[in-house]
Image (cartoon, grey):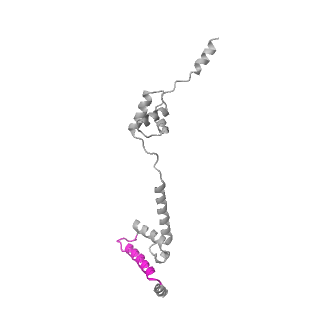
């Protein structure tokens, strides 16, 4: 009895709605029927269904009344997850652009050929060749020669034994 009473009340309410609202609600109900008609025991919304409902939720204010396949909180969770994914992909930087291995080899070769040149000088030479690269990047790829061992023991040894 209560079931039929609720159906009757809904029919009265739908008669008072505008044609646009009825058309949208009809579309939403048809979409849910399409999900139910799939050959599955338990219908599961696809990514397209999720996208459809998140778009509807952001456009039509009365979307909760037509929703029966999932809970409204689920649609809101889908929307938040999609929003997070969008901004994660948009804002994620993938680091510095890679340096061509030929340029790295050239920097190392210039450093080995001219051991007194530092990063500023090699940077200027690369700019003359038309290679746009920053000086800090050049300094990263410089080959550093081995430092000679500290010679303080020699001065200490001579001062100790010379007197």
For the stretch drawn in magenta, the main secondary structure is helix
Examine the rendered structure and indicate whether residue 158 appears above or below residue 52. above
Residue 86 is situated, as x and y percent measured from the top left of the image, at 46, 60
Q: Which residues are magenta?
A: 17-43
User: Residue 46 appears at what percent x and percent y?
Assistant: 40, 67
Q: Is residue 18 magenta?
A: yes
Identify the residue at horizontal 42%, vertical 76% (top origin).
Answer: 28
Q: Residue furthest front?
A: 128
User: Looking at the rendering, in which quadrant would you find the C terminus?
Assistant: top right
Front-lying residue, 162 or 40: 162
Q: Is residue 124 visible?
A: yes
Q: How many marks?
A: 0
Residue lying at the far left of the rendered structure: 39
Q: Position of residue 90 (x, y in %)?
A: 46, 56
Residue 46 visible in rendering: no
Q: Residue at x 41, y 74 (%)?
A: 32
Residue 130 lies, in percent from the top left, at 41, 38
Q: Is residue 150 magenta?
A: no
Instruction: Looking at this view, name the residue that lies furthest to the top.
Output: 163
Q: Looking at the picture, does residue 42 appear above or below residue 130? A: below
Please determine whether, in this image, residue 20 is positioned above or below residue 89.
below
The residue nearer to you, when weighing 83 against 105, is 105
Q: Nearer the viewer, residue 24 or 121?
A: 121
In the image, 66: left or right of 151?
left
In the drawing, does residue 96 fall left or right of residue 161? left
Residue farthest toward the right in the current orientation of the protein: 163
Locate residue 20: give its quadrant. Answer: bottom left
């Amino acid at each position: 009895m209560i079931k039929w009473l609720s159906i009757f009340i809904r029919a009265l309410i739908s008669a008072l709605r505008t044609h646009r609202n009825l058309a949208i609600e009809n579309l939403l109900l048809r979409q849910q029927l399409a999900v139910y008609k799939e050959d599955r025991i338990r219908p599961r919304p696809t990514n397209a269904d999720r996208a459809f409902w998140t778009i509807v939720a952001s456009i039509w204010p009365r979307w909760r009344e037509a929703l029966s396949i999932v809970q409204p909180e689920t649609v809101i969770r889908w929307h938040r997850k999609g929003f997070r994914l969008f901004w994660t992909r948009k804002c994620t930087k993938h680091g510095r652009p890679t340096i061509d291995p030929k340029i790295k080899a050239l920097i190392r070769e210039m450093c080995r050929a001219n051991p007194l040149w530092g990063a500023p000088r090699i940077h200027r030479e690369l700019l003359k060749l038309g290679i746009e690269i920053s000086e800090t990047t050049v300094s990263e790829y410089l080959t550093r020669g081995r430092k000679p061992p500290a010679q303080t023991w020699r001065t200490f040894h001579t001062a100790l034994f010379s007197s």
